[in-house]
Image (cartoon, helix red, strand yellow):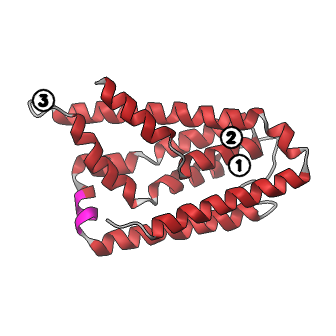
Amino acid sequence: MTIEFLITSLIVIASPGTGALYTLAAGFSRGSRASVVAAFGCTLGIVPHMAAAILGLAALLHASALAFQVFKYLGVAYLLYMAWNTLQEHGALKVDDKVDARSALQVTVNAILINILNPKLSIFFLAFLPQFVRADEAHPLAEMLTLSAVFMLMTFVVFAIYGLFAAGIRDHVISRPRVLTWMRRSFAGAFAALGARLALAEQ
């Protein structure tokens, strides 16, 4: 474990992306508990990409143009769905003071799918993780698993902070209908923009 790995990971995690955006939206609309649930879901959504990188499946995704395009457009379609859903009064930004088991599961599933349906994450980890494993490492797989666990822990903490901040100011937002409408449109536009960026992404 090096300071370079921790700093690089923090920069990558803290940079605005779909996971952070969704966690903020959950905090604004449903409060602190939902924001932590969303952060947890986004963290779980990283697991398949890290597993793919460790097992070498990401290399196949990188090599196969067809596989990459299929995966990519599934992600684009889901982000556009999230953009449309966010605009709805009872959609992703539905204001709800109580988060029951059903809504918590919905938040978790959305958060997981948002991160899973992004082929660039697998390719990112394929290039990212090996850089921090020494060539003479006796147990490279164990080292990569350790680095992955630390990255996931940092992801959860940073996203939870984002979400709890949003939850902390939600009362100032939901008490103003115009602000809430503007917020829905802004989040919907951000999801659509991220979908467009993914659509233009190359391997």
Mark 1 surroundings: few (<14), some (14-19) or many (≥20) residues within 10 A: some
- Frontmost of labels 2 and 1 is 2
Question: Taking the image as drawn, is residue 99 in sight?
Answer: no
Q: Which numbered disc flags the more N-terminal residue, 2 or 1?
A: 2
* Element at label 3: loop
In this figure, which residue is indicated by the disc labeled 1? 103
Quarter of the image with the N terminus is top left
Query: In the rendered structure, which amino acid carries the disc numbered 1?
Result: Ser
- The part of the chain drawn in magenta is 59-63
Q: x%, y% of residue 64?
A: 25, 70
Majority SS type along the magenta span: helix
Question: Quadrant of residue 175 in the image?
Answer: top right
Q: Quadrant of residue 171?
A: top right
Is the C-beta separation of discs 2 and 1 under 8 Å? yes
User: Disc 1 on helix, strand or loop?
Assistant: helix
Image quadrant assignment for residue 184: bottom right
Residue 153 position in % (x across, y down): 45, 31
Q: Is residue 81 magenta?
A: no
Please state if 28 lies on the left or on the right of 51 as rendered: right
Which residue appears at 20% of the width and 36% of the height? 141
Residue 34: numbered disc? 2
